[in-house]
Amino acid sequence: MSKKTKILLIILAIIVSVFIFEMYFAKQKTASKIVTVNSGNNSTTFSFSSSEEKLLKILMNLKFIKLDTDFFNSKIFKSLNDFSSELVPEESGRPNPFLPISKQPMPNN
């Protein structure tokens, strides 16, 4: 190998090892939030990570979405046709469809 190739491989190995170290061995820097909920005589404490906190914020934003339901009463919506077809239950095929047919196990009757 040429000298440039060796240097590039060493640099790549260092970058990969730093990435692996950060992913698996470094301490997590996410702070957890603690929430206490009081309901009557009961008190419950929850601890959330940053990803869970982000999800909760998104879910809380869903409470404020307002949908205009006038669309469902419009002439255009009522003129739509339903072209769906009924699904008929069918008998299932072979237990393992990826096995060759010659190796197919025989059912026990």
Image (cartoon, helix red, strand yellow):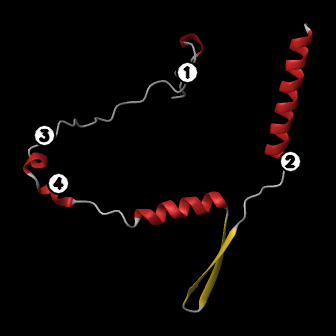
- Badge 2 element: loop
Cα distance between the residues tagged 1 and 4? 57 Å
Nearer the camera: disc 1 or disc 4: 4
**Disc 3 target residue:** 81
Q: Earlier in the sequence, mark 2 or mark 4?
A: 2
**Disc 2 target residue:** 25
Q: Earlier in the sequence, mark 1 or mark 4?
A: 4
In the image, residue 11 sits, relative to residue 84, either above or below, namely above
> Horizontal and vertical percent for residue 86?
23, 37
Task: Describe residue 49's horizontal placement relative to residue 24 as left or right.
Answer: left
**Disc 1 target residue:** 106
Nearer the camera: disc 4 or disc 3: 4
**Disc 4 target residue:** 71
Q: Which of 5 and 96 is in front in this view?
A: 5
Q: Residue 42 carries which label?
A: none
- Badge 1 element: loop
Task: Describe residue 11's horizontal placement relative to residue 28 as left or right.
Answer: right
Instruction: Determine the residue positioned at 65% across, 60% down.
Output: 50
Amino acid tagged 4: Phe
Instruction: Determine the residue positioned at 90% across, 18% down.
Output: 7
Q: Nearer the viewer, residue 107 or 45?
A: 45
Q: Earlier in the sequence, mark 1 or mark 3?
A: 3
Nearer the camera: disc 1 or disc 3: 3
